[in-house]
Image (tube, coloured by chain):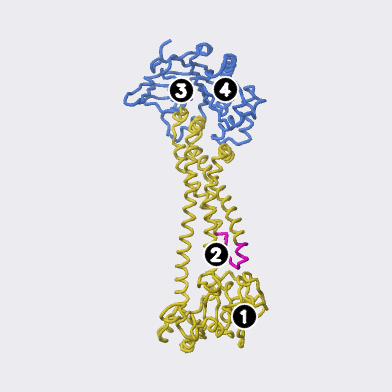
Amino acid sequence: MLDIILRNLSQRKVRTGLTVFGIALGIFAVIVMGSMSENFNQTFETSFSLTADKIRVFGSSGVFGGSVTTGKAAEVRKVPGVKDAYGLLMAPLEEGGAMSFGGNQIVGLPPEKSQTVLGPVKVKQGRFLMRGDRYETMIGTSIATQYNIGVGDRIEIRDKYFTVVGLLEYTGSFFDATAAVPLDSAQDVYDMGDMVSMIFVIPDDGVDGDLLARRIKLSVEGVDTLSPSELEKEARQSLMIFSVITVSAAVLAAIIGGLSVMNTMLMSVMERTKEFGILKAMGAERRDILIMTVGEAAIMGLLGGLLGLACGWVVVYGMNLWLAEKGIVLFLITYRLVAIAMLFAILLGTLSGIYPALRASRMSPMEALRYE
Amino acid sequence: MNNAKADIILKTRGLKETYMQGKVPVHALQGVDMEVKRGELISIVGPSGSGKSTLLSIIGMLEIPTEGEVFIDGVEVTGVKVKDIPRLRREKIGFVFQHFNLLPALTALGNVEIAMRFARVPKKERIRRATEVLTEMGLGERLNHKPSELSGGEQQRVSIARALANKPSIILADEPTGEVDTRTRDLIVGILRRLSDGGQTVIIVTHDVWVAERTDRIIRLVDGKVEDS
């Protein structure tokens, strides 16, 4: 039956080609948008897994507002169940930049704690920050690539030069876009006085993070906490919205491709009315006609899916190469995405072919034979 | 159900077919009773609108009669379930059409072979059988030619080969010589005669008196009824 299906498709090369192209465009959109979503998801998953057990403490007046002082860390440290707590100052690396997921950032931290904060990430070259460091920094791979710098080079942050002493390994997380500097220096260059963005809390072994977060909130005046589960929930909601927007746009494009399959198949079925009559006169059963017609639609879906995947892969690969020079990774094609896109393409083709196929299979053979 | 005599391959009883043309009922067949013996070559003749093609469609199970029964090889084909009709059609009937109705994208071999696909005949056997019948039709050298590369006579011979592919009980030929010249007409009639002599039952609907005169028996239809001859 496959040879008949392929023969039928090759009989109408231009129309088949245009329909396949329509589906390919949709799948291309699914791949490009989906790979962006996959990249954000993976970055989040990795970032979260690297800091999953930590609690964030903020000033009760706002998040990332610098409205909590280093002094509060001492109070937090006294809460039972807290192993360690220290302030972190987080800010955009570039002047005029904004704190965003995936954007370059500096993290000001007590230099002797750099191994604890960045610990899950291995040092590719150089060393961690240490007590006594002042204008030294450890940088992630994205910043290293973007600024074309390595260990021993200097990077300018708000008119001050910091010497790179360590280069972090690539993780696919926000650490790749992080420059870690001593907290005092960060507070100086950003003119933050004693303020920090958050207090980073490490719970004692075996202590439930969510319970400890609640205890800190009750014990220390003027702070809010973000427990690991709350952080995950908030981040997942944001990711979900992003995913829904990107994937919906892509799915819409693909559905338009599916409608073009249905249109093509309806026209094709109408043009081949007589042929179906002949086949039925020869003893073709309804299922033969159904398989033949749905098969054509499914193959167009498959071809469109493969073409869309190939084009999407080329564009994503090219974009990633281009963005790599800027130290940004924006797209990630995963096996899951490929499987979903291909399944979607075939399903779309198949479903779009069902209605025309039913029409073809239900034709009265006599009426079909009389059709001119 | 076996209501037919052993040598009677086709029997119709009280066949009626009425369809609506707008609001006007048209009685295409008004009680057709006929019998055809195994291996007979018969022709159905009659003026346009007399019901010849309708009768052929009903015998070929392409249409269901309003009333009456058709028995083929002792099986009442008008009484079987709709889902069994394609199988019966494959087993019992081979069609030859006036306009050949070959699939233009397929070669002569492909057109004959495709008829056996629906009977789930294995590919090797399909090719062997298609080659055999086409060779019998004198088209052994034209197996891989598409219909557009064949003459009218050759196309009709492919059409006959296709009808024979599944070794049916009856061949129904609707104006098989209507589109060909007289030389080819002689050739086609000769082939159908040879098939009949070999035991194949053939029913021809024709306007051509010359053709009808060369069959074993003529059934004349007038206004949807068999006229006594």
Q: Which residue is mark 3?
A: B56
Q: CA distance from mark 2 to mark 3?
A: 67 Å
Q: Which residues are magenta?
A: A320-336
Classed neighbour count for the residue bearing mark 3: other residues with Cα under 10 Å, few (<14), some (14–19), many (≥20): many
Task: Choose between A245 and B140: the one closer to the eye.
Answer: A245
Chain B rendering hue: blue
Task: Choose between B55 and A30: the one closer to the eye.
Answer: A30
Which of labels 2 and 3 is toward the front?
A: 2
Q: CA distance from mark 1 to mark 2?
A: 30 Å
Disc 1 and disc 2 on one polypeptide chain: yes
Pinpoint the chain carrying mark 4.
Answer: B
Task: Choose between B209 and A115: the one closer to the eye.
Answer: A115
Disc 1 and disc 4 on one polypeptide chain: no
Q: CA distance from mark 1 to mark 4?
A: 90 Å
Q: What element does badge 3 sit on?
A: helix
The type of residue carrying mark 1 is Phe
Which of labels 3 and 4 is toward the front?
A: 4
Q: What element does badge 2 sit on?
A: helix
Image marks 1 and 2: residues in contact by CB distance under 8 Å: no
Query: Image point 56% across, 78% down: which residue?
Result: A158
Chain A rendering hue: yellow
The type of residue carrying mark 2 is Asn
Q: Which residue is mark 1?
A: A162
Pinpoint the chain carrying mark 1.
Answer: A
Report which quarter residue A322 is drawn in: bottom right
Q: Find residue A109 and report its horizontal and vertical position in percent.
A: 55, 82
